[in-house]
Structure formats: C-alpha cells, structure tokens
Image (cartoon, helix red, strand yellow):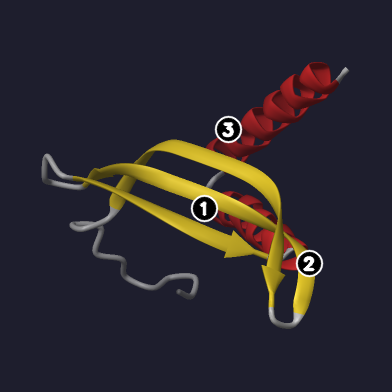
Amino acid sequence: MEPGDHVDAAGAILLDAHGVEPIMLMGESGAGPAVVMELGGRINKTDERATHMYLASGAQVGELIARMVAAGRRVEPKLREEIEAAYTAEIERLHAEAT
C-alpha cells in the first residue's frame, strides 16, 4: 500500500481486540526471539468476526510502529495527536505494571 492508494474497506476487519507477547521461536535453524500479535474484530459491513495471528521479528515490529505513526502524520494533525497520545498512555501504563 502506498500513500494516496485507493482503499476499499468493505471487507476490512474493524479492530477491537489485540494481544501482543514476546516469544522464543524454536525451529530447525535454532531458537530466536520474536513477537506474536493476535488482531481481531468484526468484518466491516457484516456480523462476522475474524482473528489472525502474526509472528514478527523485532525489526518488523519497529518498522510497523514507525509506519503507523508516520501514516498519522501524513493524514492530519488530529490523527497524529490521537496516535501519539494513545502510544504515550500505553507505554506509561506498561511501565507502571512492570514496576
């Protein structure tokens, strides 16, 4: 997807549930750290739900976070402010839980 691309959101999943956890992948080539993300929600314009699980490296997660923040900055200041405020609040909540 590139900036300015037309997006048909008719079958998009309207995100309302998510989970993220660090894991160690075990495979033939050895073990390695990764992140597992489970994203779910209602499929737009239906009553059906979908849930998908994704595995990603630390580099992939960092790129995804950066692209999501950058998307907010490209669209409008209000979206950028919403993303940055939610990000800051969640980081603060997670730090408080860890202590």
Distance from disc 1 to disc 2, alpha carbons, whole Å, reads 36 Å
Residue 96 x %, y %: 81, 17
Residue 76 x %, y %: 53, 46
Q: Going 66% across and 28% down the picture, which residue do you hit?
A: 85
Q: Is residue 41 left or right of residue 67?
A: left
Image position of 99 with respect to 91: above or below: above
Amino acid at circle 1? Val
Q: Quadrant of the N terminus?
A: bottom left
Q: Which residue is mark 2?
A: 32
Circles 1, 3 touching at the beta carbon (< 8 Å): no
Q: Is residue 94 left or right of residue 51?
A: right
> Label for residue 7?
none
Q: Which of pointers 1 and 3 lies earlier in the amino acid sequence?
A: 1
Q: Secondary structure at mark 3?
A: helix
Of badges 3 and 2, the one in the foreground is 2
Q: Going 30% across and 50% down the picture, which residue do you hit?
A: 13
Q: Which residue is mark 3?
A: 82
Q: Which residue is mark 1?
A: 75
Neighbor class of circle 2 (other Cα within 10 Å; few <14, some 14-19, many 20+) is: few
Q: Which of pointers 1 and 2 lies earlier in the amino acid sequence?
A: 2
Q: Secondary structure at mark 1?
A: helix
Q: Which of pointers 3 and 2 lies earlier in the amino acid sequence?
A: 2
